[in-house]
Image (tube, rainbow, N blue to C red):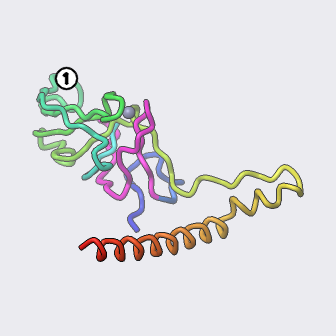
């Protein structure tokens, strides 16, 4: 499993894959499996792919006239859900910024990150909450998933039978 970025300045305690979300509406826009780099000077993370259809690529090309990426051209990336800007898709760059060309660069101030596995089960408030605690336990979740899978197999079999009858 790809591990998240060693380039990120504050990545020392990141242990699990990251999910990137639009900072405004929390739509998932990408994850660290598409990680290329974190670029501190541009305040962005660079991904080679994004969440399915949640980022829109602007049609207008803008040339940057000042700042660290002056001379680069980009199209704006926006969230398809709320239309807020998320970052840039650099079409051409100066040699210094080869790393961001033709990749999705998400502005870290415009995305939220969620590290997988950070959720903890709620603490039970009393002994009578044992059942609740059990409900949230990993074992219970695994059981539910197994049951769901079995159910889906059953549905799938039924669907196949019905489809055959219809043919
Ligand atoms: Zn959004």
Question: Whole-percent x and y of residue 72?
Answer: 13, 33
Q: Where, quadrant-wise, is the N terminus in this rendering? A: bottom left
What residue range appears in magenta?
Answer: 17-42
Q: Reply above or below: 158 against 90.
A: below
What residue sits 17% from the left and 39% below the top? 90
Q: Reply above or below: 155 against 79.
A: below
Q: Reply above or below: 43 against 98.
A: above
What residue sits 59% from the left and 53% below the top? 118
Q: Specify whether residue 143 is painted magenta.
A: no
Residue 107 as seen in the image, left or right of residue 25: left
Question: Whole-percent x and y of residue 41?
Answer: 31, 36
The residue lying toward the viewer, choosing from 125 and 7, is 125
Q: Where, quadrant-wise, is the C terminus in this rendering? A: bottom left
What residue sits 21% from the left and 48% below the top? 99
Residue receiving disc 1: 66
* Label tally: 1
Q: Specify whether residue 32 is painted magenta.
A: yes
Looking at the rendering, the quadrant in which ligand 1 lies is top left
Residue 45 as seen in the image, left or right of residue 25: left
Most extreme residue toward the top, as rendered?
A: 65
Q: Secondary structure at mark 1?
A: loop
Residue 97 as seen in the image, left or right of residue 5: left
Q: Reply above or below: 36 against 94.
A: below
Question: Whole-percent x and y of residue 165?
Answer: 31, 75
């Amino acid at each position: 499993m790809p591990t998240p970025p060693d380039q990120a300045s504050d990545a020392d305690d990141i242990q699990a894959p990251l999910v990137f979300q639009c900072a405004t509406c929390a739509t998932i826009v990408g994850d660290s499996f598409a990680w290329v780099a974190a670029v501190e000077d541009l305040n962005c993370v660079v991904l080679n792919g994004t969440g399915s259809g949640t980022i829109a690529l602007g049609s207008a090309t803008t040339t940057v006239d000042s700042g660290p990426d002056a001379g680069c051209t980009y199209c704006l990336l926006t969230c398809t859900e709320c239309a807020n800007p998320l970052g840039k898709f650099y079409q051409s760059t100066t040699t210094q910024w080869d790393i961001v060309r033709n990749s999705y660069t998400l502005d870290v101030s415009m995305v939220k990150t969620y590290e997988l596995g950070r959720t903890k089960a709620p603490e039970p408030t009393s002994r009578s909450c044992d059942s609740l605690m059990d409900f949230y336990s990993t074992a219970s979740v695994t059981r539910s998933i197994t049951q769901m899978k079995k159910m889906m197999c059953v549905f799938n079999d039924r669907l196949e039978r019905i489809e055959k009858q219809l043919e």
